[in-house]
C-alpha cells in the first residue's frame, strides 16, 4: 500500500525541468489535450529529458504503474503543458 507524499504541479515547456522524487515511487500525468510529455531519470547519465531520449506520454495520458526515480527530468513538445507528478511513499 502507498500513501500520497505530495503532488507536484508543473507547467512543462520546451526546456526540461527536474522533479526531485528522492527514490520514492511516482506516477506522471499529462493533462494536455494536444502536447506530448517526455520524461527520464536524470541520475544515471546526468542528462535532462529531450524529445529524443525521453519516454513519451501522449496527450491526456498517465503512467499506469508507479516507478521509482531520484531526479525525474520532464519536458514537453509544447509550451505551457500541465503536468502532475504524484509522489508516493510505501507504507
Image (cartoon, helix red, strand yellow):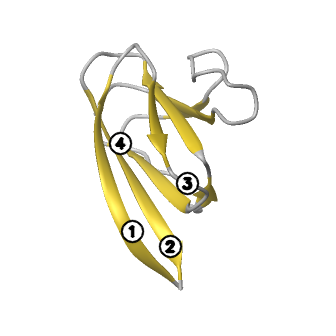
* Mark 3 burial class by Cα count in 10 Å: few <14, some 14-19, many 20+: few
Location of mark 2 (residue): 89
Q: Nearer the viewer, mark 3 or mark 4?
A: 3
Residue 31 pos. (x, y %): 29, 41
Q: Earlier in the sequence, mark 2 or mark 1?
A: 1
Q: Nearer the viewer, mark 1 or mark 3?
A: 3
**Residue drawn at 34 percent across, 19 percent down:** 13
- Above or below residue 48? Residue 21 is below
Mark 4 to mark 1: distance in Å? 23 Å
Location of mark 4 (residue): 60
**Residue drawn at 38 percent across, 72 percent down:** 4
**Looking at the rendering, in which quadrant would you find the N terminus?**
bottom right
Question: Which residue is nearer to you in this view: 66 or 71?
Answer: 71
Location of mark 1 (residue): 5
Judged from the image, the secondary structure of the residue bearing numbered disc 1 is strand
* Mark 1 burial class by Cα count in 10 Å: few <14, some 14-19, many 20+: some
Residue 26 pos. (x, y %): 51, 58
Q: Nearer the viewer, mark 4 or mark 2?
A: 2
- Above or below residue 82? Residue 76 is above
Judged from the image, the secondary structure of the residue bearing numbered disc 2 is strand
Mark 2 to mark 3: distance in Å? 10 Å
Tag shown at residue 22: 3
Question: Do callouts 2 and 1 mark residues in contact (Cβ within 8 Å)?
Answer: yes
Residue 59 falls in which quadrant of the image?
Answer: top left
Residue 27 pos. (x, y %): 48, 56
Mark 4 to mark 2: distance in Å? 25 Å
Q: Earlier in the sequence, mark 1 or mark 3?
A: 1
Q: Is residue 49 left or right of residue 82?
A: right
Judged from the image, the secondary structure of the residue bearing numbered disc 4 is loop
- Above or below residue 33? Residue 28 is below
Amino acid at each position: 500500500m502507498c500513501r500520497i507524499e505530495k503532488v507536484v504541479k508543473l507547467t512543462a515547456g520546451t526546456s526540461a525541468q527536474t522533479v526531485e522524487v528522492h527514490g520514492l515511487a511516482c506516477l506522471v500525468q499529462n493533462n494536455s489535450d494536444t502536447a506530448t510529455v517526455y520524461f527520464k531519470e536524470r541520475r544515471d547519465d546526468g542528462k535532462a529529458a529531450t524529445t529524443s531520449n525521453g519516454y513519451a506520454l501522449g496527450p491526456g495520458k498517465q503512467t499506469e504503474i508507479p516507478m521509482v526515480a531520484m531526479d525525474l527530468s520532464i519536458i514537453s513538445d509544447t509550451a505551457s503543458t500541465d503536468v502532475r507528478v504524484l509522489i508516493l511513499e510505501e507504507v
